[in-house]
Image (cartoon, rainbow, N blue to C red):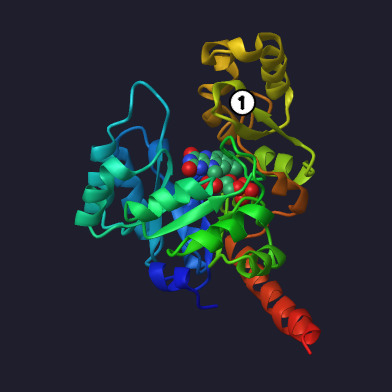
Amino acid sequence: MKTRITELLGIRHPIIQGGMHYVGLAELASAVSNAGGLGVLTGLTQKTPELLSREIARCKDMTDKPFGVNLTFLPTFAAPPYSEYISAIASGGVKIVETAGRSPEAYMLAFKAADIKIIHKCTSVRHALKAQKIGCDAVSVDGFECGGHPGEDDVPNFILLPRAADELRIPFVASGGMADGRSLVAAMALGAEGINMGTRFVATQEAPVHPKVKQAIVAASELDTRLIMRALRNTERVIRNAGVERILAIEQKMGHALKIEDILDEVAGVYPRVMQQGEVDAGAWSCGMVAGLIDDVPSCHELISRIMAQADQIIRGRLIGLTC
Ligand SMILES: Cc1cc2nc3c(=O)[nH]c(=O)nc-3n(C[C@H](O)[C@H](O)[C@H](O)COP(=O)(O)O)c2cc1C
């Protein structure tokens, strides 16, 4: 399938694996890229820019196809050394960056100087327009159903995507709730040029996470996610578990007076425990409502081939037949 996104990124299929903390390591990113999609390393999972350089080199040993790096601009006081991370990306020869969190405006000159294409992930039309204005090459439009941070507007993709299509000139991919060929065809119908998936890629053979994490996603239904940190305006969609129930109880008690310190035990330092040790109840970890559509753990190649075959079957077998 040829779209503005496959052309822009030099990939075969219009499928991107979004950056995921402690999941987007070289094993997964290279597997997605080798299967014809765009794999993405998660920059800040590497504790220093030097470690990111090593991870980029490791990924290059595993694939000769394009891959990207996610750089998440966090709402923290002690900001990571972003300029040094960008230098590591540029000197590693990576030409695609997925930015997320805040606007990448302050770093656009550095990205452009290194001939890096920017896909900014955002959850509203106004942020997508801002990304377009500052020179981003594409956006990833994350609907309310997404795993991770859906923003504070709560607009689901059936509305958000056509709104984005009405306003944007740069290409965009649909993110949040994407799982299969039906998702891809629907996203294209709503104006997107491809899809970005997070949760679906966690439940793959190559995702370098504990089998219990994959099992938890397969076992979860579309009813098994919760929103936390709303009072902090840092809403996150996470899988329901014992740690999250504790967070929700604290949030209910504290109301608008909630501070991050109140829930720090269940949100800070949880990812390595969950993803590497398999302590799936340790606290909050991102997961989308799309878990309800995930019931197996295929290889990335099987998954991407299946999505493309199903999309083809829907377009040629069903949709063309409906026109008269
Ligand atoms: C376990 C997990 C960790 C994530 N970590 C990040 C992250 O560090 N930075 C980021 O920009 N997005 C992160 N995301 C969001 C994904 O990149 C993607 O936008 C989102 O999962 C799309 O929604 P979906 O899960 O419905 O496919 C994460 C998602 C998951 C499931």
User: From the image, which quarter does the C terminus lie in?
Assistant: bottom right
**31, 288: nearer the viewer:** 288
- So how many labels did they put on this image? 1
Image coordinates of residue 166 in percent, x first then y, are 55, 62
**21, 214: nearer the viewer:** 21
Image coordinates of residue 19 in percent, x first then y, are 48, 47
Q: Using a 10 Å C-alpha cutoff, classify the residue at mark 1 as few (fewer than 14 neighbours), some (14 to 19) or many (20 or more).
A: some
- Ligand 1: which quarter? top right
Residue at screen point 60% across, 21% down: 231
Please state if 213 lies on the left or on the right of 101 as rendered: right
Residue at screen point 59% across, 61% down: 300
In the current view of this chain or complex, which residue is farthest to the bottom? Answer: 324
Give SS at disc 1.
helix
Residue at screen point 78% across, 80% down: 318
Quadrant hosting residue 280: top right
Residue at screen point 64% across, 23% down: 282
Please state if 310 lies on the left or on the right of 285 as rendered: right
Would you say residue 45 is visible in this rendering?
yes
Q: Amino acid at mark 1?
A: Arg
Please state if 25 lies on the left or on the right of 237 as rendered: left
Image coordinates of residue 38 in percent, x first then y, are 47, 61
**213, 158: nearer the viewer:** 158
Quadrant hosting residue 270: top right
Would you say residue 26 is visible in this rendering?
no
Image coordinates of residue 10 in percent, x first then y, are 40, 71
Residue at which label 1 appears: 230
In the current view of this chain or complex, which residue is farthest to the front? Answer: 167
User: From the image, which quarter does the N terminus lie in?
Assistant: bottom right
| Above/below status of 244 relative to 19 | above
